[in-house]
Amino acid sequence: MLYVDTTIQLLELRAFVAVVRSRTFTAAADVIGTDKAHVSRLVSRLEGKLDARLLQRSTRRSSLTETGRDFYERATSILGALEEAEASVARARGKPRGTLRLTAGVEYGMLRVNGWIAKYLRRHPEVQVDADLTNRVVDIIHEGIDVAIRVGALELSELSARKLGEIRYAFYASPAYLRRRKRPKTIADLERHDLIMFTPRGRPAWKVVRGSESAEVEIGTPRYHVNNNVAARDAARLGLGIALLPSFMAADAVRSGHLVVLLRGWERVPAPVYAVFPSSKYMAPKVRAFIDLAQEESTAECKPQSKPQFKSKSTRARS
């Protein structure tokens, strides 16, 4: 059985519209960048598929038939819609716009990411942000999330990620606490102090490093055990003991004199911070603009990489 292709092609529509607007096949050929014979074949093929005469041809010019006039109006509408769609995609490629959906952990989201969002919205007036600050591990593909900010090592997945930097940690206590208790000079001294622990439930311990040295501080019973870093920071400010905190979280309290850095050089192993997203290919401007800004805003506690690094990893780490 002979198969006849009756699908109308865009090039056929463009050739037909060009002939109508230019009045001649020769001029139409110049418009679409081909030769007169090719334009004639395209229009004839279109008429064959429609089984209708669209143009009355003469040696000097062509004119529309009644059927051709009606088809011309519809063809120009189709091509106009296509051109507008192409222009819309081109505009979207160049300028951030639309709604950015992101997720981040509660603490890091409130204390760091929220500031990035504010600057992002001021910088790009045509975007909106829908943020989900949660310690639940969000499935960004199935929940339609554009970018997730995650803290900790990433598990292998088909997602892409850019490392934004690292969270640094240090020991802190209030001046009031240090007036009551002798300032620790070594890691071992911590065992004789009141400690504020932020750890997962289980055996309380701090694993810390200083250059090539490492140590583990085991605490039998911490004075205050809590699963929230903000609460641990505030407890340290109130003089309840010594806390191991993210430096960015304690920075304001240090500047105001409410907290003091102890045992300089000793810290928990820095925690990497990543922007995780579905794909680095065809990334929407709104997503790229936010990730670029997040990297700019990462300061001493969240040091940016000199060059963006994309890799196909995701995370199950708590963000």
Image (cartoon, rainbow, N blue to C red):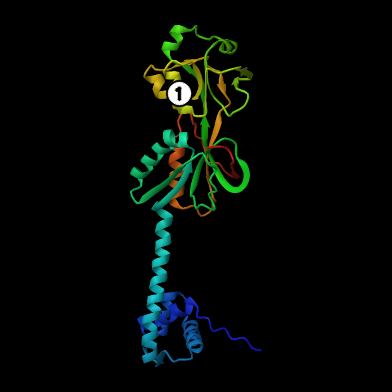
**Which residue is found at the position 53% from the left and 49% from the top?**
140
| Secondary structure of residue under mark 1 | helix
Q: Which one is in front, 28 or 160?
A: 160
Badge 1 amino acid: Arg
Residue 141 in view: yes
Which residue is the extreme one toward the right?
1
Please count the marks in the image: 1
Location of residue 233 by image quarter: top left
Residue 305 in view: no
Q: Which one is in front, 215 or 139?
A: 139
Q: Position of residue 111 (x, y in %)?
A: 42, 33
Q: Position of residue 5 (x, y in %)?
A: 57, 83
**Which residue is found at the position 45% from the left and 79% from the top?**
13
Location of residue 236 by image quarter: top left
308 versus 86 height, above or below: above
Q: Position of residue 191 (x, y in %)?
A: 58, 12
6 versus 151 height, above or below: below
Q: Which one is in front, 235 or 120?
A: 235
Location of residue 218 by image quarter: top right
What residue sits right under mark 1 in the picture? 233
Assess disc 1: are there few (<14), some (14-19) or many (≥20) residues with their C-alpha within 10 Å of its C-alpha.
many
Q: Is residue 23 left or right of residue 210?
A: left
Q: Position of residue 193 (x, y in %)?
A: 53, 12
219 versus 73 height, above or below: above
Quadrant of the frame with the N terminus: bottom right
